[in-house]
Amino acid sequence: MHKIGRIIIWSMAAITSGCVLLLSAAFLYLNPQIPDAATFKDVKIRAPMRIYSADRKLIQEFGERLTPIRYEEIPPLFVQALLDTEDKRFFEHSGIDLITVANATWLLIRNQGSIRSGASTITMQLVKNISGESQVRFIRKFKEMLLALKIERELSKKEILTLYLNIIPFGKHAFGIQAAANTYYGEDIGQLTLAQIAMLAGIPKAPEAGNPINGPERALARRNLVLQRMLDQNSISRAQFEESSQAPLTARVHQRTIELPALYIAEMVRKRLLTEYGRGAYNRGLIVHTTIDSDMQLAAEKAVLNKLNQYDRRHGYRGPEYRRIHGSDEYVAAPEYGYPANWIASLEKAQVLGNQYPAIVIAIRDQEIDVLNQDLETITIAWEGMSWARTYLTVNSRGRKPRGAAEISNIGDFIRIEPSGGNWNLGQVPDIQGALVALDPKMGAIKALVGGYDFKAKQFNHATQAKRQPGSNFKPFFYAGAIENGLTAATIFNDAPIVLPGGELEQTYRPRNSGGSFQGNMRLREALYRSVNLVSLRVILNYGPVNAINYVKRFGFDTSGFPKDVQLAFGGGTIALTPLDIVTGYATFANGGFKITPYLIEQIDSINEDVVFKATPAIACITDCEEIDKAPRVVEARVAYIMNSILSDAIRRGTGTKALRALQRSDLKGKTGTTNDADIWFSGYTHDLVATSWAGFSDNSPVGNREWGSTTPIETWIEFMEEALPAESSSTTLARPNGIVSVRIDPDTGFRAEPSDPDAIFEIFRKEFAPTANLAGKEEEADPYKQIF
């Protein structure tokens, strides 16, 4: 008997020694492969890229959904739900729960090697989630155990639990408990009920198949198991258990709360970060702070949408998007059977574009129609809301006014409707596109940018990608060069017909003014604010096309494709600039002559790192500039002052008077532009804000012979500036630079006027180019810059 006992004892000792040797060998083999546990203190949480406006409004979020949370913010009830279900001795073990390991080993032996129960602690699950390995292998399990022991020595239990609850997946692209609560319940974790907490605590077991959206029955069963475990551990009362286990499933996918839906801005940022950081940009937790002012952006979006809609209505109704879609005949024959499945499917798939909602005509009466909207509600469109729909014939013509609803639509037509003062009108998605960009002229910060009617309909960004002919919007840039070269605002040019040599076939070129009239001699100032083409042509001939091209480079334009001929005078030919290019050029006038660089991203932070990027723009500065990065001066200060004066006249008495009438301000400056009926522009500014508005068709089709820079573009600019500009009383002013003089001149000759001349006017000059007094009542000797060109 004693011999058998000794055999048993020695056998057990041998087995124990063997296990110790085996474990020691495993440790010696695996330990070098295991990372230092201290690295877990610096784990980079996979969080999405978030883009914000300058005033902290969320513009967009790209990537998996994750919102970091501190331990103090985790509800104790959730901690109990998790631990009672997954690791009830979490605060007692040192990373490995030996009791659970023993149970799992016994089950492994009993089930002849079939793994039906794991022995992972929360710490081991943390290791698995960070490493990304999920296949059940004994070597991986040993690694997890060893690393769990190391982690427990480096991190506190609270730190381990917090890290775990910030990174584990919950399905539906949600990582961490805060993102899971936001995704499934639209609330923060601290606001959830016990039933909702138990639901979330059960999801990590099978985050995709077991979440309440993909697998509602499985999720409910798992929730009730969590509640049962909490009851067994006395974490909740019987009454709480009964109430929560009977609670209905209330989870649904809640979309991310976008406070400022500026999709063109979001796409610009996304593309830049994707270029700089690769696809990792989506999960590095980058927090992008843009320069966008949310109020200005909303005003810009609204202005572009409203004015493109108004342009569209002026040009007529192109008809339903789809006529009598499939199912219409069946509905007309037997409406009592309800709406056709294709109708419902078509409405579900259709997107709202701008403020144009999809609808299907279901009834027509004399002067009103009934439509079915996306909520399958019936809406009546009265005659007042559809009588505008004269048939579109061409860009310049429409059909007669409709007399009844049947002339406009039929039952089964897929149309658009738009809200209007509590009612609904017949609508239409415009074919024309538009863009608006607004900058801070001192630093170049982009305050608002709209790249088209609706990003969902056309992702092409017309503000930054559409290179178009700027027309007369381009004139101020070479006029500034001509003045800097020695002309003055009083230089007289002849607005008269001119014939220029043509091409190789000895054709002649006869440029003309808009409207075809000629006004004879006029001052340079008047020629610019009235946008007289033939004077602009003579300015280019006098200045020289090559000189003009070299000068306008100063504004940052890529002139490599510019024509070296008189097409420069009209902003046409091969000149191709984007609205962002143009507004940047006008910022130079607005800031007194400095070249600024537009920028959109102010700073990039990360939840894993400190500041990743911070903009350091060069600033337009005139005084007290010692400690700043000063923008380079590209226009002489006095020339900039004179140009601002002329562009102020363009608002007060030229092509931009509509802006003065609407805004009633004296600090406005700007210029219209129209090119071959295809592109229409307006650029305007104060010294605080500069904005360019453009409209045109993507295929360069004509916009119509009744459309100018003084229609849709200036109207868009006005509506935007009404909201964006500060009160005139707080508007910035630029001091008059030294070397500017004001002289009374004869408006017909540009020379200094006699003291008794009743028709004399004041003009400003650079001091060295001011006209001198006449001698003995005679005109001064003509200087080369006061001749008639």
Image: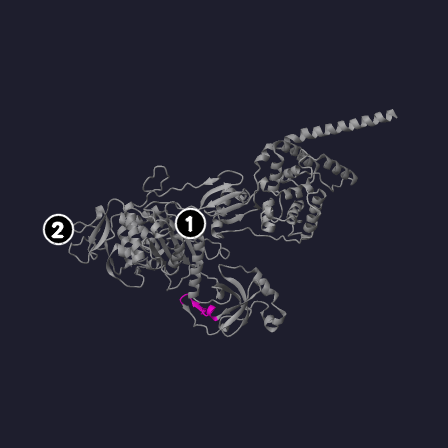
Colour mode? one colour
Of marks 2 and 1, the one in the foreground? 1
- Mark 1 residue crowding within 10 angstroms, few (<14) / some (14–19) / many (20+): many
Pointer 1 residue: 447
Instruction: Measure the C-alpha gap from mark 2 to mark 1.
Output: 54 Å
Residue at numbered disc 2: 775
Q: Is residue 576 visible?
A: no
- Which numbered disc flags the more N-terminal residue, 2 or 1? 1
Percent coordinates x, y for residue 489 in the rendering: 25, 52
Q: Tell me the quarter of the picture where residue 159 sits.
A: top right
Q: Which residues are magenta?
A: 383-396
Q: Residue 685 magenta-drawn?
A: no
- Whether residue 787 sits left or right of residue 98 in the image: it is left
**Residue 31: which quarter of the image?**
top right
| Relative depth, front residue between 159 and 535 | 159
Residue visible at 26% across and 47% down in the picture: 485
At label 2, which amino acid type do we have?
A: Leu
Task: For the N terminus, give its image quadrant.
Answer: top right
Residue 413 appears in which quarter of the rendering? bottom right
Is 375 positioned to the left or the right of 440 in the image? right
